[in-house]
Image: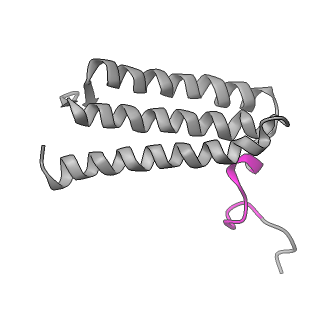
Amino acid sequence: MYGPGPSIGSGDEDIADLLPENGWTKWGLGVGLACLVLALGLVCIIHRSVSIYDDSWVPFVIDGTDAVAIGVALLGLALLLHCHFFWSQTRRLGGLAEVGKAVALVISIVSAAVLIVRMGILNR
């Protein structure tokens, strides 16, 4: 009825398939956005403090080990972005992209779990 092949919204497509393989996705998302997320993660780790603002511009400050956990999760996200958008589009590094994405996901999930346990369960 709808024809063969995946359609947008069917769940069969990969996010990399939705974006064209060109210099903008490779360098803009794989390097530019990844460097921005990397910088945010490094700021969280170095300053050991994160301020999150809500609608009323009242800061919610997270500091100490919790801020470092957020920073490490952001570093994992930066690695994931770089591996997915840059390495996946490079023939030489295509095989390593999957390994890099797996490592990045483990880093992000473990640091997010540490943050959830510390802030949600232990109330620190």
Expressed as whole percent of the image width and height from the top left, the position of residue 84 reads: 67, 41
Expressed as whole percent of the image width and height from the top left, the position of residue 45 reads: 33, 24
- Residue extending farthest to the left is 123
Front-lying residue, 4 or 31: 31
Left or right: 46 as drawn, with respect to 35: left
- Place residue 32 in its image quadrant: top right
Q: Does 47 sit above or below residue 120?
A: above
Left or right: 8 as drawn, with respect to 108: right
Answer whether residue 86 is magenta in the image. Answer: no
Magenta stretch secondary structure, dominant: loop
Expressed as whole percent of the image width and height from the top left, the position of residue 101 reads: 61, 45
Q: Quadrant of the C terminus?
A: top left
Front-lying residue, 21 or 116: 116
> Is residue 53 something that shows in the picture?
no
Which residue: 28% across, 18% down? 47
Coloring basis for residues: one colour
Q: Does 35 sit above or below residue 124?
A: above
- Place residue 50 in its image quadrant: top left
Q: Does 12 sit above or below residue 124?
A: below
Q: Does 14 sit above or below residue 39?
A: below
Which residue: 73% across, 59% down? 13
Answer whether residue 15 is magenta in the image. Answer: yes
Q: Quadrant of the N terminus?
A: bottom right
Stretch of the chain drawn in magenta: 7-17
